[in-house]
């Protein structure tokens, strides 16, 4: 059977002159090398940043009289045209030109001739790509934060709409103590809040301009880096040229934040999968967010949640990719760094798509409040509260715990819930039980957990209000 | 600034009926869900396997009278047509049809009408995709082995061509003892040989037919799995239907083998980078395999080796992706498994492209034999041999080592190589030194390492011959 | 607050002479360096292998007259004594002697004097540690295989004891089709069988003797490697000295096999967690294998399964550790390789402990056959079988699937299971339904899946017998 | 051969009553389960935090009259005694008591009797361990920052001491442009500065008190969480009880910061390895920080750097461990979380030990200024400067680059450095070359890179001063 991978057939190449670095070379690059080193399909995503950074650079060169002002103007005009071509999808991308940078410069030469060659004065692809990618990273952080806010709002709305729903809280996936569903959902708002902060801090670390660092040592021209930073919206300058071209911390920061955010979503995903099982039966997925089976007509599968769960591993793997890439790399720039973008973009796309689809799905989730409430009281979920009742009668907690442990064993054997035990039965385990021990109610148990952070309805109501205020500003 | 990610714009969807599982659902799938669950761009690579498996299945259904023979024939004819369309690039792929399986089935219905609906008798997408992917995995193992053999041959040719080149052997990146370059290169043939074995064993584990397992429990039809296995070239049947649809070990096996193979190449890549540095100066990269700098006209950069090094991390990350995907998945099929293919194909593509470009580059590497030989004797590289000389005079090795350690310190201080020390100077450290201790030569040192596996020229020559025989069969 | 980490306080060191390599050095090693490079706490686990390999080496040296026979005998006697000290826990380990090798050699010198210095003739720590670790790896593979067999037997016994238990089979954690619990459990025997094969193959790759490779280039002595291999039980020789000291593939192979085996156990762990939840209620953990809560007296937590799940990630991380360690390492030996052992031993310990505790727990699991059977029929689990019934009446499967999809929607709305629908209700969806469509039974559905690999009781019984035979040999 | 792993032999256990949760259980825990779930060897490191948090909790219980004040006082006194025992190494640790928490509580009971049972009122091990670990994490962040500052200072001192050393700057490990060694070293101060910031931010996220969250739902007592937070030095309260016990973000944050910091050190380690090779010859490791070979007397190996490089992978693997551990965990607490500590402590220990040994080694590094300067001018390292010279004559950079590329090829063929080319030879490539093109000097080239961030000596001097000021405050 013929070869199946879709290898780009490399044409016999007479393209030597297209390279920006051809002067010293006599032989054309081997076609397999061209294919192996090609970064255009990945880095063309940086076109807006490439144009913006080039314009700011050209203007500065003109202002500083490093190149003639007229040439600077011509370059800027040419770049604007190119930008319009790209925005309109009319730009003639050429794979044989390696990367976004060479594509732009070659196109500029077609438009304004030899003057285009002045644009690369006082810069190198090394500081150029670092600039593009930091610009991009800042925006990606903003996009992530926006998407996080949307999911937070969706979860908040869901919590508000279900503010009276009581369900079992779980530890070890065993029913533990009753909680409000709203309380449970608010836990995710807390997680996502930390995620937003992480992206904000990642943005802060990306917010320094590398341009002006040249290949690695700085450039021998009277450049004005501050004005470029200002024009591009960078808060500060990279302070060491070698670090500036060798550093990809901001990529790691972004992917690390994305990994943890996906991990949080994977926990929510797992709960959606569990809750929508027949066994839990707490949740129904609406048609638009469930998928069926090609063979079993009765199935309603939580595929979105399953895929989000799996893709969490994929994002974490991007983190491993960039850490492995950076490990033991000597300074300054090495071609290894090209691999940063694929990992970055994969992490970003997966994260944003996942946040978006969860934000759309969340408001559609339907809970079975009745069944949730029943589950919340079954399985002796109020055992801790019975123990606490004994504690309030003066018994040390540890002994109270022991008493209730024996009581549970007895009740299980009798096949009775607490409510069906008689006062006498209670007293066989401790004389401290009040007459109405069996009447310890679900709502009282909830109300009692009223310290800050607890699941008491008034606490949860206050938390809902606090979040609503926060997310509306 | 407008949103930059290239999100497929999801059209308002009236496509409900296109799904293979629409019966129970009243609402159309949400467009974001369609986008999130779409696997076609990834799994369409499996088209040959999909067609082959479907044809074998349809034939068996006919033979077993599960569907009418005439229907089976019509289905096979239709599938053949579809295969031709795909091979010719004329197949009308439709994203809204989720995956390769639905695309094929829908197209088949266009061609042969309602009869197409009989093809999915006695199978499920769960056993179907496992069958496709195992077929693919077996072929991918073969491709990997072929590519490994090519690189082995290229390295062997390079070793033969440089069979007299002596160079320093390194430990801790310090010059340690002289070795033949050919001996050094043959170490990579050993590594690659293990890689080939690993792919062979991975292929063996993939070589079992899942089809007939249905969704998870088997199928209630009198199918004949053996004949399907025979037709598709599987050595055996998956013996448990639940394992058959839940198992992705064969994906892990492939990616694990690819990770280790890439790791081996990364070691070679590192050496190419080191050896072609000005400092080592052992190697010149030909123009076709070096790249230049956009700013520094004198540079010749080993970009291929650098990218291979970085991509090693990427492949290892795919391994982590699939292990994380499988972790704690309850039986049997879960949608998480869809992510296996992206990881598989990325690992495979990266591996094969890397092996190919290294196989092309290797024969073009030019060594500086002169400089290598000089380096091999400098820095007291024969110190161990001097110690061994004392051992042969009866001194225990440990004491001999101590003597030579002091001798090296002395010689360093004098700024002299061993050859320039006088017999008297040698004797100051041990009376056991023979008169001609200084004349201990490089070639004698090499010749002495003549036990099997050593760098003695006749051993290496024998190894070269053994490999040539092996790789020519 | 004072510093909390338990840092070994490094004493001011006059220990220079203790090193095996002190000759050239004038200054003592810095105490922090001693602490940082110390490998003894990790590698002392290799003591049996170290002694065995040293004895075999010394004997060969004597046989080949590389050292006097009497010296060889003295060395062997000394090593035997050391071995007894170690086995009895009386060996005076000394941290300042770096590693296991130096400890043994220094102790040998205490016992037999200067002759001990002859042991290190014609070997290096580089080939020595590789030999020890390969010996260890082969045994570790055997231990893993043995532990796997025990768990397989335990699962088989459990399956046999529950051979009539019917439960829901799940896909997407949704009830899909009924299966036999025994069938479900046998899926794990299949997975574990592949694991055993993987360890067997890993053992095969470890089964080559590195000794005789010296530091990297071979040794200048007339050694006889074959006899050493024979004595130590190695199947073959490492064929290239540089590869022999640089290769850690066999460590990767072991950890890769362990990662996948742990992944399989994590799936079983997840099911134990799910099944023992109140919601599933299929399984009761016995007291000896459940743990309680410090606060909630009613809890029975599946901690063993949870820890196994978490430790799966830990083992996979060891794989990442060694792959990262090996990435881009130039030949031959580098100190980085020392880290192989910590990763290896962590993976091994975790795996074996996990297999052992699961083998002990498995026979104690108690299933609720009643509840499992009820669950197996609920939620329209026989929908596929109804569709297949229509197919047997001549309807193409795709249409049958659509019909049943609509039927399920109708029945759900009525709140009725299939059994309560009237023939008239069935006929509203298709005239092909037979009179007794509602009577389609669970057992018939199981029996129908009788092709090889399916869940039909007679198939499962045959599989149980096959496994019993296999595991008893 | 007998089993080699050092498995703790589990004694037949009658220890049921020792558990804090024994009441409901009739059978003792299986010995293998005890061994498998034991966390004491790991979590005993948290003893200071455990005592501090328990004291603060007991005091609050007394203040709030939840337990009698006298009991609170007795508890505090008992805990103080226990703290002294632990600090003095006299505490009788008992493995059979699972963890640090139970050890403390059981010991307290020995000291103050039944009253000890009141300590566990209004708390659970779930919020307790989260509190301990957050306290610990904050201190670990401080320790990391302190160790980072030490290494920064050491690097700064080294840079100051070598402020006139010129060396080749590298890209792709090819000599690119001359730089000051001090400039190169300052790049690492920048990286470490970001690391310090990351630990600072991680500390900020850890700085919230979980205590008061109970098992997951809050506690039914009138606790005062603010006063506990104040006493323990927490800046704020965890706002959601379920998040509080389920959250391990702060562990991920710490390990992520440690991974990136180790990655930075691995780059420095790689450079130390390269620079101390015979080929680079820029650096001599002092005796105290080099190690020798057991067989090659002339070797001086950079083992510390090699181990740091390998351990970078180990720390990154801990990150993967905790991300995998958290993935898809349903709320709230699950036993999986126990694995957080092993990963945390391994990452912390490795990081701190590595920073410490590098801080000790750095001031001892000796550079060969002469050789570095020679290397800085060789290999046409001033080619970019020649191109820039043409640019200043008006040639667009792109053309200038092409001209110099051809010039380099010519000079290489002639075997001449730029300095030996005649003006006529220069003019053959461009008439724009000034008469003295050949005299373009190294120092001029350095001076020219004077924009902020560049390697010009006055820029670097200013940066050294800035750092000195910063690190002295």
Image: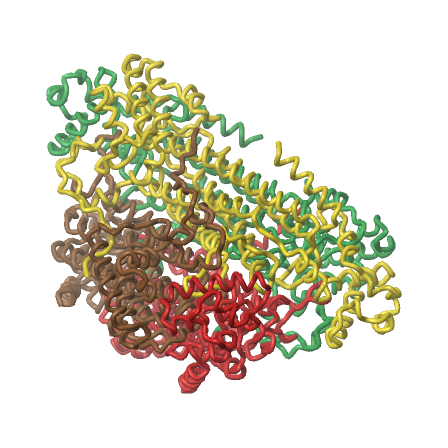
Chain colours: A brown, B yellow, C green, D red
Instruction: Pick whichever, A35 or D21, lies toward us.
Output: A35
Q: Quadrant of the N terminus of chain B?
A: bottom left
Percent across and percent down for residue C298 are 31, 53
A141 relative position to B13: left or right: right
Q: Is residue D466 visible?
A: yes
Quadrant of the image occupied by residue C377 = top left
- Who's the residue at 41% across and 34% down the image? B136
Quadrant of the image occupied by residue A100 = bottom left
- Who's the residue at 75% across and 76% down the image? B414
C221 shown above or below B254: below
B284 shown above or below C439: below
Percent across and percent down for residue D3 are 62, 49
D330 shown above or below C416: below
Instruction: Pick whichever, C180 or D286, lies toward us.
Output: D286
Percent across and percent down for residue B38 are 26, 41
Quadrant of the image occupied by residue A160 = bottom left
Q: Quadrant of the C terminus of chain B?
A: top right
Instruction: Pick whichever, B99 or D411, lies toward us.
Output: D411
Query: How many numbered discs, if any?
Result: 0
Percent across and percent down for residue C462 are 45, 23
Instruction: Pick whichever, B70 or C178, lies toward us.
Output: B70
Q: Is residue C357 visible?
A: no
C222 relative position to D176: left or right: right
């Amino acid at each position: 059977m013929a070869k199946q991978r879709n290898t780009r057939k490399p044409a016999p190449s007479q393209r030597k002159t297209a390279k920006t670095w051809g002067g010293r070379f006599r032989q054309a690059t081997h076609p397999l090398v061209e294919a192996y080193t090609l970064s255009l399909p990945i880095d063309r995503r940086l076109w807006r940043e490439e144009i913006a950074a080039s314009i700011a650079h050209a203007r500065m060169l003109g202002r500083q009289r490093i190149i003639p002002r007229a040439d600077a103007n011509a370059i800027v005009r040419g770049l604007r045209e190119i930008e319009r071509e790209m925005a309109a999808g009319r730009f003639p991308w050429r794979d044989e030109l390696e990367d976004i940078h060479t594509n732009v410069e070659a196109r500029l030469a077609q438009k304004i001739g030899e003057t285009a060659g002045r644009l690369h004065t006082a810069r190198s692809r090394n500081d150029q790509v670092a600039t593009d990618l930091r610009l991009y990273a800042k925006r990606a952080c903003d996009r992530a934060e926006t998407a996080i806010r949307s999911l937070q709002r969706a979860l908040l709305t869901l919590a508000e709409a279900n503010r009276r729903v009581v369900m079992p809280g779980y530890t070890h996936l065993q029913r533990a103590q009753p909680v409000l569903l709203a309380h449970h959902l608010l836990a995710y708002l807390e997680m996502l809040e930390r995620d937003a902060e992480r992206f904000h801090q990642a943005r802060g670390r990306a917010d320094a301009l590398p341009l002006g660092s040249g290949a690695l040592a700085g450039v021998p021209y009277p450049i004005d880096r501050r004005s470029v930073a200002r024009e591009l919206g960078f808060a500060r300058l990279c302070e060491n040229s070698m670090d500036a071209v060798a550093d990809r911390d901001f990529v790691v920061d972004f992917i690390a934040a994305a990994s943890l955010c996906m991990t949080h979503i994977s926990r929510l995903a797992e709960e959606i999968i569990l809750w929508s099982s027949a066994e839990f039966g707490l949740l129904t997925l609406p048609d638009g967010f469930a998928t069926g089976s090609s063979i079993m007509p009765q199935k309603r599968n939580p595929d979105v949640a399953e895929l989000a769960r799996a893709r969490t591993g994929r994002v974490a793997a991007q983190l491993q990719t960039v850490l492995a890439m950076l490990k033991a790399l000597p300074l300054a720039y090495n071609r290894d760094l090209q691999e940063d973008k694929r990992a970055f973009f994969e992490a970003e796309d997966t994260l944003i798509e996942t946040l978006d689809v969860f934000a759309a799905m969340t408001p559609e989730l339907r809970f079975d409040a009745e069944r949730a409430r029943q589950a919340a009281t079954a399985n002796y979920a109020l055992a801790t509260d019975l123990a606490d009742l004994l504690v309030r009668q003066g018994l040390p907690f540890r002994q109270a715990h022991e008493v209730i442990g024996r009581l549970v064993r007895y009740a299980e054997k009798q096949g009775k819930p607490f409510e069906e035990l008689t006062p006498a039965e209670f007293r066989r385990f401790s004389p401290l039980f009040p007459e109405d021990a069996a009447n310890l109610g679900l709502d009282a148990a909830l109300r009692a957990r009223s310290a800050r952070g607890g699941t008491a309805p008034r606490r949860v109501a206050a938390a809902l209000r606090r979040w609503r205020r926060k997310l509306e500003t």
